[in-house]
Image: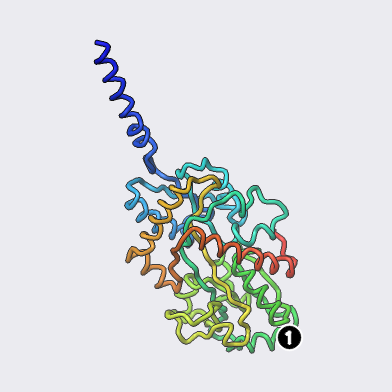
């Protein structure tokens, strides 16, 4: 009897590690993907596209939860304060990770200490656009007009401190000109007023501007990438027109809270990289003129480390303050 009890105890002991491993297997339940912007925008659509493929790879549902507001800070703060077990991750964007630390006097999270970069998802240039009947045919034309009448040219943006606004502020600083900024509640609202003739120009995100450019409702004067885009091959870069410093790429990637275990980071990174090679996901990015991301967590972290001081300087030099 005693021998049987000893054997049973030994068998139970051998089973325990296996049981613990089974319980700790990640992921073992649905994952929440926080998107810090509203439904229907590029961040939301990309979250759903990439999340859908990653859920197939990981074998668990990924549910996108939109938490918009405060320039992306509300949703990003939720990610930062989540339990670091891999069940709350989210989309990390250009503004909350590289701009808002300089734009807002106080943030509820530290973008450099409270968040873990997991995988870059994409980069996308902006396009300097005017109305098709605009007298400005080149960047030089805009600069000449702005210098002749400081403050007369009005540019639209999708809000203070966003990529539209910062691109124009950087352009003003580099070109030595003064224009008037009119912020809107969204890039789409700003683009509508541009086409309506209420403002003269706008640095619009490539994916959003493409339909209007191809439909003849906007004219593209320049693109903010280092090289020309395959989807707009006739549009010169800002560098080609004498302003190489105005190189802007709006980027976003997968992030998680501080303390996320390295094994889970690597598992999510591998799944995200694989999802980015899915033909449907990849084709949608390229069709919008965006660059497909990927790479290691360290490479994504290096991008943020480079971008944050650059855009912090633009915010401070232009004395930009949140609404």
Write the residue at 65% across / 85% down. 142
User: Is residue 312 rendered to the left or right of residue 280?
Assistant: right
| Quadrant hosting residue 317 | bottom right
Percent of width and height locating residue 25: 37, 40
Give the answer, above or below, for where 208 lies relative to 37.
below
Taking the spot 57% from the left edge, 73% from the top edge, the residue there is 248
- Nearer-the-camera pick, 83 or 20: 20
Judge by depth and name the residue closer to the eye, 316 or 182: 316
Residue situated furthest front in the rendering: 3
* Quadrant housing residue 101: bottom right
Which quadrant holds the C terminus? bottom right
Estimate how packed mark 1 is, as few (under 14), some (14 to 19) or many (20 or more) residues with alpha carbons within 10 Å.
Answer: some
Residue 17 percent location from the top left of the image? 35, 32
Residue under the point 61% across and 51% down? 113
Horizontal relation, residue 106 to residue 252: left or right: right
Q: Position of residue 31 (x, y in %)?
A: 42, 45
Task: Name the residue: 43% across, 80% down.
Answer: 230
Position of the N terminus, as image quadrant, is: top left
Tell me where residue 241 sits by quadrant.
bottom right
Q: Nearer the viewer, residue 101 or 264?
A: 264
Which x, y percent locates residue 63?
A: 41, 47
Q: Is residue 4 above or below residue 247?
A: above
- Is residue 312 placed above or below 212 in the rendered structure? above
Q: Which residue is mark 1?
A: 147
């Amino acid at each position: 009897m005693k021998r049987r009890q000893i054997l049973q105890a030994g068998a139970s002991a051998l089973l325990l590690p296996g049981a613990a491993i089974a319980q700790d297997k990640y992921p073992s339940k649905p994952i929440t993907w926080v998107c810090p912007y509203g439904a229907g925008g590029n961040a939301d659509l990309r979250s759903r596209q990439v999340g859908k493929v990653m859920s197939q790879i990981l074998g668990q549902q990924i549910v996108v939860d939109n938490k918009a507001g405060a320039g992306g800070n509300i949703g990003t703060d939720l990610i930062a304060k989540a339990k670091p077990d891999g069940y709350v991750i989210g989309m990390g964007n250009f503004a909350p990770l590289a701009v808002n630390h300089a734009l807002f006097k106080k943030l509820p999270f530290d973008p450099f200490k409270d968040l873990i970069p997991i995988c870059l998802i994409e980069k996308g240039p902006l396009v300097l656009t005017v109305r098709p009947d605009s007298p400005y045919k080149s960047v030089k034309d805009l600069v000449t007009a702005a210098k002749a009448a400081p403050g007369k040219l009005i540019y639209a943006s999708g809000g203070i401190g966003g990529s539209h606004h910062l691109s124009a502020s950087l352009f003003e600083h580099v070109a030595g000109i003064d224009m008037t900024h009119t912020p809107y509640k969204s890039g789409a609202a700003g683009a509508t007023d541009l086409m309506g003739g209420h403002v003269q120009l706008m640095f619009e995100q490539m994916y959003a501007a493409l339909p209007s450019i191809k439909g003849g409702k906007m004219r593209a004067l320049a693109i903010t990438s280092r090289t020309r885009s395959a989807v707009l091959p006739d549009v010169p870069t800002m560098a080609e027109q004498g302003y190489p410093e105005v190189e802007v790429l709006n980027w976003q990637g997968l992030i998680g809270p501080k303390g996320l275990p390295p094994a889970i980071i690597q598992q999510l990174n591998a799944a995200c990289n694989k999802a980015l090679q899915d033909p449907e996901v990849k084709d949608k990015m390229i069709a919008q003129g965006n660059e497909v991301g990927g790479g290691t967590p360290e490479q994504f972290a290096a991008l943020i480390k480079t971008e944050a001081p650059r855009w912090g300087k633009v915010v401070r030099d232009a004395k930009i303050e949140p609404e």
